[in-house]
Amino acid sequence: MVCCSDSVTEYVQTIKDLSCEVLDHMAQGLRLPDKSLSCLIKDDDNDSCFRVNHYPPFDDNNNIENSINYPLVEFREHCDPHIITILRSNDMGGLQIYSKDNPWISVPPRPAEFCVFVGEALQVLTNKRFLSVKHRVLANFRKQSRISMMNLTWGEYKKLVFSRRLRDQRLEFFELP
């Protein structure tokens, strides 16, 4: 068990470093001072969470015809409330992001690549110059399990954000007039 713990600790640190690098590039694009965004997750008091989601195989032939018009959702649509999410998954599909132009777009599974989601806290911090993205996971009638690993980073807004109900208007408390 110790070697697994060491491996997880090393992976989480690598993802945290990647998160900082991404945030540093975002800050540079916004012409903010160096490390002004990455300092939010480098702080020793910062909370972060490493999460592994397992979506078991789904093989229900009775529902295949219904899935074309009414897809079976395994993890309902949501926006991440924190600063940034770095996501990695195996080669099974199912992840979708929402777009106003084409409501749900499938994200191609690429195990050697990472998917970066802006969280609602970062959307607020950048005054909507970077937007959080609504996403969900579909069952897709897979024959194999889908596994996703993500490192979630939290900021100063955690207490207030989580004191509110999970709804679309929870950011109104942070928005500038």
Image: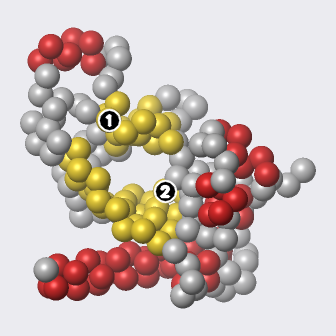
Residue at the spot x=51%, y=79% of the render?
20
The residue closer to the viewer here, 125 or 111, is 125
Q: Quadrant of the N terminus?
A: bottom left
| Helix, strand or loop for disc 1 | strand
The part of the image, by quadrant, that contains residue 174 is bottom right
The residue closer to the viewer here, 148 or 26, is 148
Give x and y (percent) for residue 54: 23, 50
Q: Amino acid at mark 2?
A: Phe
Most distant residue in the front direction: 163
The part of the image, by quadrant, that contains residue 157 is bottom right
Residue 125 appears left or right of 41: right
Give x and y (percent) for residue 139: 26, 33
Q: Badges 2 and 1: C-beta atoms under 8 Å apart?
A: no
Give x and y (percent) for residue 168: 65, 39
| Helix, strand or loop for disc 2 | strand
Q: Which residue is mark 1?
A: 74
Q: Amino acid at mark 1?
A: Glu
Residue 73 appears left or right of 63: right
Give x and y (percent) for residue 95: 34, 42
The residue closer to the viewer here, 76 or 36, is 76
Residue at the spot x=30%, y=45% of the render?
108
Q: Earlier in the sequence, mark 2 or mark 1?
A: 1
Residue at the spot x=15%, y=13% of the render?
62
Residue 26 appears left or right of 21: right
Q: Is residue 55 depicted above or below 51 in this figure?
A: above
Tell how many labels: 2
Is residue 82 in sight in this rendering?
Answer: yes
Residue 117, disc: 2
